[in-house]
Protein backbone atom coordinates (compact mmCIF):
# COMPACT_ATOMS: atom_id res chain seq x y z
CA UNK A 1 0.00 0.00 0.00
CA UNK A 2 1.24 3.45 -0.88
CA UNK A 3 2.54 5.11 2.29
CA UNK A 4 1.71 8.83 2.15
CA UNK A 5 4.10 9.88 4.92
CA UNK A 6 6.99 7.94 3.42
CA UNK A 7 6.29 9.35 -0.04
CA UNK A 8 6.28 12.93 1.25
CA UNK A 9 9.45 12.33 3.24
CA UNK A 10 11.21 10.82 0.23
CA UNK A 11 10.27 13.81 -1.89
CA UNK A 12 11.35 16.35 0.72
CA UNK A 13 14.64 14.50 1.23
CA UNK A 14 15.38 14.38 -2.49
CA UNK A 15 14.70 18.05 -3.20
CA UNK A 16 17.16 19.00 -0.48
CA UNK A 17 19.94 17.26 -2.41
CA UNK A 18 21.26 19.92 -4.78
CA UNK A 19 21.30 18.64 -8.36
CA UNK A 20 21.36 21.48 -10.91
CA UNK A 21 22.13 20.22 -14.40
CA UNK A 22 25.68 18.90 -14.52
CA UNK A 23 25.84 18.43 -10.74
CA UNK A 24 23.93 15.16 -10.27
CA UNK A 25 26.63 13.23 -8.40
CA UNK A 26 25.06 13.41 -4.92
CA UNK A 27 21.51 12.63 -6.03
CA UNK A 28 22.90 9.76 -8.09
CA UNK A 29 24.63 8.31 -5.02
CA UNK A 30 21.44 8.61 -2.96
CA UNK A 31 19.30 6.94 -5.62
CA UNK A 32 21.87 4.19 -6.12
CA UNK A 33 21.66 3.41 -2.43
CA UNK A 34 17.84 3.40 -2.43
CA UNK A 35 17.55 1.18 -5.51
CA UNK A 36 20.23 -1.23 -4.29
CA UNK A 37 18.21 -1.73 -1.08
CA UNK A 38 15.21 -2.51 -3.27
CA UNK A 39 17.15 -5.34 -4.89
CA UNK A 40 18.30 -3.73 -8.13
CA UNK A 41 21.68 -3.96 -9.78
CA UNK A 42 22.63 -0.32 -10.30
CA UNK A 43 25.22 1.08 -12.66
CA UNK A 44 26.11 4.36 -14.34
CA UNK A 45 26.81 4.59 -18.04
CA UNK A 46 29.76 6.59 -19.33
CA UNK A 47 27.67 9.80 -19.33
CA UNK A 48 26.53 9.37 -15.72
CA UNK A 49 22.98 8.20 -16.35
CA UNK A 50 21.72 5.80 -13.69
CA UNK A 51 20.45 2.40 -14.91
CA UNK A 52 18.93 -0.09 -12.46
CA UNK A 53 17.97 -3.57 -13.58
CA UNK A 54 16.96 -6.87 -12.03
CA UNK A 55 16.92 -9.32 -14.92
CA UNK A 56 13.82 -10.94 -16.32
CA UNK A 57 12.37 -10.96 -19.79
CA UNK A 58 10.87 -7.89 -21.44
CA UNK A 59 11.36 -5.40 -18.60
CA UNK A 60 9.23 -2.27 -18.35
CA UNK A 61 11.09 1.02 -17.98
CA UNK A 62 10.29 3.55 -15.26
CA UNK A 63 12.05 6.82 -15.98
CA UNK A 64 12.59 10.36 -14.71
CA UNK A 65 15.54 12.77 -14.67
CA UNK A 66 17.83 13.68 -11.79
CA UNK A 67 18.70 17.29 -12.61
CA UNK A 68 16.83 20.50 -11.86
CA UNK A 69 16.90 23.98 -13.34
CA UNK A 70 18.39 26.94 -11.48
CA UNK A 71 17.99 28.46 -8.96
CA UNK A 72 17.99 24.98 -7.42
CA UNK A 73 20.59 25.13 -4.66
CA UNK A 74 19.57 25.18 -1.00
CA UNK A 75 15.93 24.19 -1.49
CA UNK A 76 13.90 24.17 1.72
CA UNK A 77 10.55 22.38 1.24
CA UNK A 78 7.49 23.20 3.30
CA UNK A 79 4.09 21.51 3.49
CA UNK A 80 1.11 23.85 3.26
CA UNK A 81 -2.16 21.93 3.36
CA UNK A 82 -2.19 19.78 0.19
CA UNK A 83 0.84 21.49 -1.33
CA UNK A 84 4.60 21.31 -0.96
CA UNK A 85 6.40 24.58 -1.74
CA UNK A 86 9.90 25.98 -1.40
CA UNK A 87 10.47 28.51 1.36
CA UNK A 88 13.82 29.61 -0.07
CA UNK A 89 14.29 31.77 -3.13
CA UNK A 90 14.56 28.71 -5.34
CA UNK A 91 12.50 26.43 -7.50
CA UNK A 92 11.05 23.46 -5.58
CA UNK A 93 12.63 20.72 -7.69
CA UNK A 94 9.40 18.84 -8.25
CA UNK A 95 10.60 18.66 -11.84
CA UNK A 96 11.58 15.89 -11.78
CA UNK A 97 11.94 14.70 -8.19
CA UNK A 98 8.19 14.28 -7.86
CA UNK A 99 8.47 11.71 -10.64
CA UNK A 100 11.42 9.98 -8.98
CA UNK A 101 9.57 9.90 -5.65
CA UNK A 102 6.46 8.34 -7.20
CA UNK A 103 8.58 5.60 -8.81
CA UNK A 104 10.47 4.85 -5.59
CA UNK A 105 7.28 4.72 -3.51
CA UNK A 106 5.60 2.30 -5.93
CA UNK A 107 8.60 -0.01 -5.74
CA UNK A 108 8.77 0.31 -1.93
CA UNK A 109 5.07 -0.40 -1.59
CA UNK A 110 5.10 -3.57 -3.67
CA UNK A 111 8.19 -4.86 -1.89
CA UNK A 112 6.61 -4.17 1.49
CA UNK A 113 3.43 -6.01 0.44
CA UNK A 114 5.44 -8.90 -1.05
CA UNK A 115 3.36 -8.39 -4.18
CA UNK A 116 4.28 -9.87 -7.53
CA UNK A 117 5.25 -7.43 -10.24
CA UNK A 118 6.60 -7.41 -13.76
CA UNK A 119 10.37 -7.09 -14.41
CA UNK A 120 11.49 -3.48 -14.13
CA UNK A 121 14.27 -1.35 -15.55
CA UNK A 122 14.76 2.06 -13.91
CA UNK A 123 16.47 4.85 -15.85
CA UNK A 124 17.23 8.17 -14.17
CA UNK A 125 18.98 10.52 -16.58
CA UNK A 126 21.15 13.57 -16.03
CA UNK A 127 21.17 16.93 -17.83
CA UNK A 128 17.63 16.58 -19.15
CA UNK A 129 17.13 20.29 -18.61
CA UNK A 130 20.03 21.08 -20.96
CA UNK A 131 18.15 19.74 -23.97
CA UNK A 132 17.80 16.03 -23.10
CA UNK A 133 21.57 15.58 -23.07
CA UNK A 134 21.49 12.61 -20.70
CA UNK A 135 19.00 10.65 -22.78
CA UNK A 136 20.77 11.59 -26.00
CA UNK A 137 23.99 10.13 -24.59
CA UNK A 138 22.38 7.16 -22.82
CA UNK A 139 24.12 3.83 -23.46
CA UNK A 140 21.18 2.06 -25.10
CA UNK A 141 23.17 -1.17 -25.30
CA UNK A 142 22.42 -1.49 -21.58
CA UNK A 143 18.68 -0.92 -22.07
CA UNK A 144 16.37 -3.89 -22.68
CA UNK A 145 12.94 -2.29 -22.31
CA UNK A 146 10.61 -1.88 -25.27
CA UNK A 147 8.11 0.24 -23.33
CA UNK A 148 8.54 3.07 -20.84
CA UNK A 149 6.51 5.41 -18.70
CA UNK A 150 8.21 8.73 -18.06
CA UNK A 151 7.07 10.67 -14.99
CA UNK A 152 7.99 14.15 -16.19
CA UNK A 153 4.78 15.91 -17.20
CA UNK A 154 3.46 19.07 -15.61
CA UNK A 155 0.12 18.57 -13.89
CA UNK A 156 -1.82 15.65 -12.47
CA UNK A 157 -0.91 12.03 -13.31
CA UNK A 158 -4.14 11.54 -15.28
CA UNK A 159 -2.72 13.91 -17.91
CA UNK A 160 -1.06 12.01 -20.77
CA UNK A 161 1.16 13.89 -23.21
CA UNK A 162 0.35 12.65 -26.69
CA UNK A 163 2.06 15.34 -28.80
CA UNK A 164 5.48 16.89 -28.27
CA UNK A 165 7.32 19.33 -30.58
CA UNK A 166 10.55 19.32 -32.51
CA UNK A 167 13.03 21.64 -30.80
CA UNK A 168 15.59 23.81 -32.57
CA UNK A 169 18.24 25.87 -30.80
CA UNK A 170 20.38 28.53 -32.42
CA UNK A 171 23.55 30.44 -31.59
CA UNK A 172 24.37 33.72 -33.31
CA UNK A 173 27.86 35.14 -32.83
CA UNK A 174 28.62 38.76 -33.71
CA UNK A 175 32.14 40.15 -33.93
CA UNK A 176 32.33 43.90 -34.28
CA UNK A 177 35.29 46.15 -33.53
CA UNK A 178 36.31 47.51 -30.17
CA UNK A 179 37.04 51.20 -29.57
CA UNK A 180 37.13 53.63 -26.68
CA UNK A 181 33.55 54.78 -26.13
CA UNK A 182 34.55 58.31 -25.13
CA UNK A 183 37.58 58.95 -27.35
CA UNK A 184 36.88 57.35 -30.73
CA UNK A 185 33.55 55.48 -30.79
CA UNK A 186 33.28 56.20 -34.53
CA UNK A 187 36.12 53.72 -35.07
CA UNK A 188 34.22 50.93 -33.35
CA UNK A 189 31.46 48.60 -34.50
CA UNK A 190 29.10 47.75 -31.65
CA UNK A 191 28.23 44.06 -31.63
CA UNK A 192 25.47 44.78 -29.09
CA UNK A 193 23.88 47.35 -31.41
CA UNK A 194 23.91 44.80 -34.24
CA UNK A 195 22.46 42.18 -31.91
CA UNK A 196 19.62 44.49 -30.94
CA UNK A 197 18.80 45.21 -34.57
CA UNK A 198 18.91 41.51 -35.41
CA UNK A 199 16.66 40.54 -32.50
CA UNK A 200 14.11 43.17 -33.55
CA UNK A 201 13.71 41.26 -36.81
CA UNK A 202 12.82 38.01 -35.02
CA UNK A 203 9.48 36.84 -33.53
CA UNK A 204 9.03 36.33 -29.81
CA UNK A 205 6.78 34.28 -27.52
CA UNK A 206 3.82 32.19 -28.62
CA UNK A 207 3.35 32.33 -32.36
CA UNK A 208 0.37 29.98 -32.55
CA UNK A 209 -1.25 27.30 -30.38
CA UNK A 210 1.68 24.89 -30.93
CA UNK A 211 4.65 27.11 -31.83
CA UNK A 212 6.94 29.23 -29.64
CA UNK A 213 10.08 31.29 -30.20
CA UNK A 214 12.43 32.63 -27.55
CA UNK A 215 15.68 34.56 -27.19
CA UNK A 216 17.09 33.04 -24.01
CA UNK A 217 20.43 34.73 -23.40
CA UNK A 218 22.52 37.62 -24.70
CA UNK A 219 26.19 37.92 -23.74
CA UNK A 220 28.16 40.93 -24.90
CA UNK A 221 30.63 43.57 -23.89
CA UNK A 222 33.13 43.77 -21.05
CA UNK A 223 33.13 47.34 -19.73
CA UNK A 224 30.83 50.33 -20.11
CA UNK A 225 33.44 52.60 -21.66
CA UNK A 226 34.33 50.39 -24.61
CA UNK A 227 32.43 49.78 -27.85
CA UNK A 228 31.65 46.05 -27.45
CA UNK A 229 33.44 43.77 -29.89
CA UNK A 230 31.73 40.42 -29.23
CA UNK A 231 28.12 39.39 -28.56
CA UNK A 232 26.46 35.98 -28.52
CA UNK A 233 22.72 35.40 -28.87
CA UNK A 234 21.22 32.05 -27.80
CA UNK A 235 17.65 31.21 -28.74
CA UNK A 236 15.20 28.44 -29.53
CA UNK A 237 11.99 27.67 -31.36
CA UNK A 238 9.73 24.65 -31.26
CA UNK A 239 6.68 23.23 -32.99
CA UNK A 240 5.33 19.86 -34.16
CA UNK A 241 4.63 21.44 -37.56
CA UNK A 242 7.45 20.86 -40.06
CA UNK A 243 6.41 23.70 -42.40
CA UNK A 244 6.29 26.16 -39.51
CA UNK A 245 9.76 25.11 -38.38
CA UNK A 246 11.16 25.48 -41.89
CA UNK A 247 9.71 28.98 -42.02
CA UNK A 248 11.30 29.94 -38.71
CA UNK A 249 14.68 28.59 -39.75
CA UNK A 250 14.45 30.74 -42.87
CA UNK A 251 13.40 33.75 -40.80
CA UNK A 252 16.45 33.43 -38.52
CA UNK A 253 18.76 32.96 -41.51
CA UNK A 254 17.27 35.93 -43.33
CA UNK A 255 17.65 38.19 -40.28
CA UNK A 256 21.30 37.20 -39.99
CA UNK A 257 21.91 37.80 -43.70
CA UNK A 258 20.28 41.25 -43.51
CA UNK A 259 22.62 42.47 -40.77
CA UNK A 260 25.57 40.86 -42.54
CA UNK A 261 24.75 42.91 -45.62
CA UNK A 262 24.30 46.13 -43.64
CA UNK A 263 27.38 45.73 -41.41
CA UNK A 264 29.93 44.41 -43.88
CA UNK A 265 32.92 44.99 -41.60
CA UNK A 266 31.41 42.86 -38.84
CA UNK A 267 31.44 39.06 -38.71
CA UNK A 268 28.03 37.51 -38.05
CA UNK A 269 27.65 33.73 -37.92
CA UNK A 270 24.66 31.54 -37.15
CA UNK A 271 24.29 27.86 -36.27
CA UNK A 272 20.96 26.06 -35.88
CA UNK A 273 20.75 22.66 -34.18
CA UNK A 274 18.00 20.06 -33.87
CA UNK A 275 17.90 18.99 -30.21
CA UNK A 276 15.02 16.52 -30.46
CA UNK A 277 12.20 15.53 -32.76
CA UNK A 278 8.44 15.70 -32.41
CA UNK A 279 6.20 12.73 -31.76
CA UNK A 280 2.50 11.98 -31.76
CA UNK A 281 0.93 9.07 -29.87
CA UNK A 282 -2.06 7.66 -31.69
CA UNK A 283 -5.28 6.53 -30.00
CA UNK A 284 -4.50 2.86 -30.63
CA UNK A 285 -1.10 2.96 -28.90
CA UNK A 286 -1.19 -0.12 -26.59
CA UNK A 287 0.82 1.46 -23.76
CA UNK A 288 -1.26 4.64 -23.80
CA UNK A 289 -4.40 2.49 -23.65
CA UNK A 290 -2.97 0.54 -20.69
CA UNK A 291 -2.06 3.74 -18.87
CA UNK A 292 -5.51 5.24 -19.50
CA UNK A 293 -7.10 2.08 -18.08
CA UNK A 294 -4.92 2.29 -14.97
CA UNK A 295 -5.87 5.95 -14.52
CA UNK A 296 -9.56 5.05 -14.71
CA UNK A 297 -9.05 2.36 -12.05
CA UNK A 298 -7.94 5.17 -9.72
CA UNK A 299 -11.27 6.92 -10.26
CA UNK A 300 -9.67 9.58 -12.44
CA UNK A 301 -10.47 10.66 -15.99
CA UNK A 302 -7.61 10.33 -18.48
CA UNK A 303 -6.80 13.57 -20.30
CA UNK A 304 -4.57 13.84 -23.34
CA UNK A 305 -2.71 17.04 -24.09
CA UNK A 306 -0.09 18.72 -26.23
CA UNK A 307 3.08 19.76 -24.46
CA UNK A 308 5.36 22.50 -25.71
CA UNK A 309 8.16 20.95 -23.71
CA UNK A 310 10.36 18.02 -24.56
CA UNK A 311 11.25 15.08 -22.35
CA UNK A 312 13.44 12.02 -22.43
CA UNK A 313 10.52 10.27 -24.14
CA UNK A 314 11.39 12.20 -27.32
CA UNK A 315 14.77 10.45 -27.38
CA UNK A 316 13.48 7.06 -26.19
CA UNK A 317 10.85 7.00 -28.92
CA UNK A 318 13.49 7.81 -31.55
CA UNK A 319 15.36 4.73 -30.29
CA UNK A 320 12.31 2.50 -30.74
CA UNK A 321 11.09 2.45 -27.13
CA UNK A 322 7.34 3.07 -26.93
CA UNK A 323 7.37 5.80 -24.27
CA UNK A 324 4.52 7.76 -22.71
CA UNK A 325 4.84 10.82 -20.46
CA UNK A 326 2.37 11.43 -17.65
CA UNK A 327 1.94 14.21 -15.11
CA UNK A 328 3.79 13.93 -11.81
CA UNK A 329 1.85 16.40 -9.61
CA UNK A 330 4.22 19.30 -10.27
CA UNK A 331 2.91 22.76 -11.18
CA UNK A 332 4.51 26.06 -12.31
CA UNK A 333 7.66 24.28 -13.44
CA UNK A 334 10.86 26.30 -13.78
CA UNK A 335 9.54 29.14 -11.61
CA UNK A 336 9.89 30.24 -8.00
CA UNK A 337 6.16 29.60 -7.53
CA UNK A 338 6.54 25.89 -8.32
CA UNK A 339 4.58 23.51 -6.09
CA UNK A 340 3.66 19.84 -5.82
CA UNK A 341 0.13 18.74 -4.95
CA UNK A 342 0.32 15.93 -2.38
CA UNK A 343 -2.91 14.20 -3.39
CA UNK A 344 -1.74 14.13 -7.02
CA UNK A 345 1.69 12.84 -5.98
CA UNK A 346 -0.03 9.96 -4.21
CA UNK A 347 -2.03 9.24 -7.36
CA UNK A 348 1.19 9.23 -9.40
CA UNK A 349 2.69 6.61 -7.08
CA UNK A 350 -0.51 4.56 -7.24
CA UNK A 351 -0.53 4.76 -11.02
CA UNK A 352 3.04 3.50 -11.16
CA UNK A 353 2.16 0.70 -8.75
CA UNK A 354 -0.83 -0.45 -10.82
CA UNK A 355 1.18 -0.51 -14.04
CA UNK A 356 3.94 -2.74 -12.67
CA UNK A 357 1.88 -5.01 -10.43
CA UNK A 358 0.99 -8.43 -11.82
Image: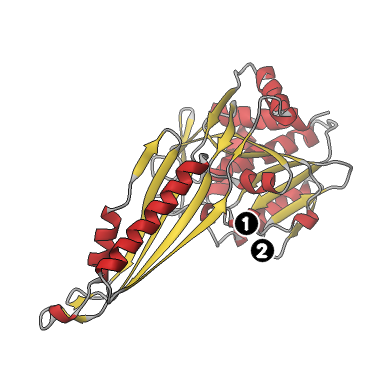
Mark 2 neighbour class, 10 Å CA radius: few under 14, some 14 to 19, many 20 or more = some
Residue annotated with mark 1 = 134
- Give 63 or 278, whichever is nearer the viewer: 278
Q: Residue 220 vs residue 50: left or right? A: left
Q: Residue furthest front?
A: 261
Give coordinates of residue 10: x percent, y percent.
61, 42
Give coordinates of residue 263: x percent, y percent.
25, 70
* Residue 283, quarter of picture: top right
Give coordinates of residue 82: x percent, y percent.
49, 28
* Secondary structure found at label 1: helix
Q: Is residue 87 visible?
A: no
**Residue at x 28% of width, y 73% of height:** 264
* Secondary structure found at label 2: loop
The image's colouring method is secondary structure
Task: Tell me if label 1 and label 2 are in contact, CB under 8 Å.
Answer: yes
Q: Which mark is residue 310?
A: none
Q: Residue furthest top?
A: 299
- Give 123 or 102, whichever is nearer the viewer: 123
Residue annotated with mark 2 = 47
Mark 1 neighbour class, 10 Å CA radius: few under 14, some 14 to 19, many 20 or more = many
**Residue at x 29% of width, y 59% of height:** 198
Using the numbered discs, state the Cα–Cα distance from disc 1 to disc 2 in whole angstroms.
7 Å
Q: Is residue 143 visible?
A: yes
In this view, 191 is above or below 153:
below
Indicate which disc, 1 or 2, sits on the residue closer to the N terminus.
2
Give coordinates of residue 193: x percent, y percent.
22, 66
**Residue at x 82% of width, y 41% of height:** 59
- Give 189 or 342, whichever is nearer the viewer: 189
**Residue at x 51% of width, y 36% of height:** 307
Quadrant including the C terminus: top right
Quadrant including the N terminus: top right
Amino acid sequence: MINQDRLIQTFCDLVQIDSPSGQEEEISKDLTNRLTKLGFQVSLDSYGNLIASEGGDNPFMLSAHMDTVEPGTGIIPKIESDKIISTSKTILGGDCKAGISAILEALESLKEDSADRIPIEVVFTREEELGLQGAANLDFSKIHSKEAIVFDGEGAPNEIITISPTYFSFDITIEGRAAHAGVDPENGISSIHIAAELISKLPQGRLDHETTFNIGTIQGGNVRNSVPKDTIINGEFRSPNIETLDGLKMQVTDAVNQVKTKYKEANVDNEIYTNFHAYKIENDNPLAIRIASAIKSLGLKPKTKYSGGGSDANIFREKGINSVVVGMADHNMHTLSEYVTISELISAAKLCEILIKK
